[in-house]
Amino acid sequence: MTGPDFRHIELGDVASTNLECMERARAGDAGHLWITAERQTGGRARRGRNWVSEPGNLYSSLLLIDPAPWEALASLPLAVTLAVHDAIASVLPGEAAESLRIKWPNDMLIDGQKTSGILIEAEQLVDGRRAVVIGCGVNVAHFPEASLYPATCLADQGSAVTPQDLFARLVVSMDRTLNDWDQGRGLAGIRDAWIERAQGIGKPVTVNLPDRQIHGLFDGIDDEGRLMLAMPDGSRQMIASGDVFFS
């Protein structure tokens, strides 16, 4: 994505890089656009949560227009998560890199502590095109003290990387991984690579849903990235979204 087909706009303070990308899509932008910001004043995480966005961390979003047929987009988060994982792993010292794992659906954990989040949003535009925005936030220099999970940042894990250097690596890894994904045609390899990097497969987990908790064994993911939960009675439940806690 460093090639001529991709552009990069670097901003100062914005409400959110995702919103910046989507507004440009609505205004007719052709996509293949990265936007980064020094600070976000209204950054969001999954399920509408706020994301602490002070200067020093990486705030980036990628706008794609019609990146794949609609039915293939369900597996796009798997490829995106791999790209973020590999970019972060490339800037961590050995022991921290080895402990970097993906927490379903798309968070990054270093030794069990969250260091990154991903928010993917899609919108059908009035001209018929479909805009997909891939938001990637990484705790580089600091992290939120109050969150659902223990958190950390790359600096505390022995990395001297800057947000700019990490972004350059993310651009390369995202390009490579999206090419491997190939509009869903390369899903089998992407899914296998995701599972290799995942936290807690085969172990007990609790999944918090809006209306209840479910307990079972994390039994991997299906081709749409849904969590497969092996239940005590021998059945299997498929979870499309929820908050996972390891027992």
Image (tube, rainbow, N blue to C red):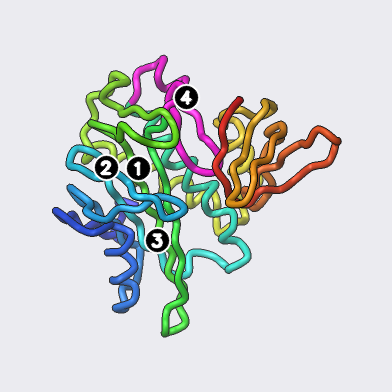
Q: Which mark is residue 133?
A: 3
Mark 1 lies on residue: 170
State yes or no: discs 4 and 3 in contact (Cβ < 8 Å).
Answer: no
Q: Classify 10 Å Cα crowding around label 3: few (below 14), some (14-19), many (20 and above).
A: many
Q: Residue type at mark 1?
A: Leu
Q: Which of marks 3 and 2 is nearer the N terminus?
A: 2
Q: Distance between the residues labelled 3 and 2?
A: 16 Å
From this viewpoint, is residue 118 visible?
Answer: yes
State yes or no: discs 2 and 1 in contact (Cβ < 8 Å).
Answer: yes
Q: Earlier in the sequence, mark 4 or mark 3?
A: 4
Q: Distance between the residues labelled 4 and 1?
A: 22 Å
x and y percentages locating residue 37 in the rendered image: 21, 51
Q: How far apart are marks 2 and 4 (CA)?
A: 20 Å
User: Which type of secondary structure does the marked residue at label 3 adopt?
Assistant: strand
Q: Earlier in the sequence, mark 2 or mark 4?
A: 2
Between marks 4 and 3 in the image, the one whose residue lies nearer the viewer: 4
Q: Which mark is residue 70?
A: none
Between marks 2 and 1 in the image, the one whose residue lies nearer the viewer: 2
x and y percentages locating residue 220 in the rendered image: 68, 37
Q: Which mark is residue 58?
A: 2
Q: In this view, does 190 lie above or below 126?
A: above
Magenta range: 92-113
Residue located 85% across and 36% down the image:
234
Judged from this view, the residue extending furthest toward the bottom is 127
User: Which type of secondary structure does the marked residue at label 4 adopt?
Assistant: loop
Q: Distance between the residues labelled 4 and 3?
A: 27 Å
Residue 224 or 5: which is nearer the viewer?
224
Please identify the quadrant where the C terminus is shown. Answer: top right
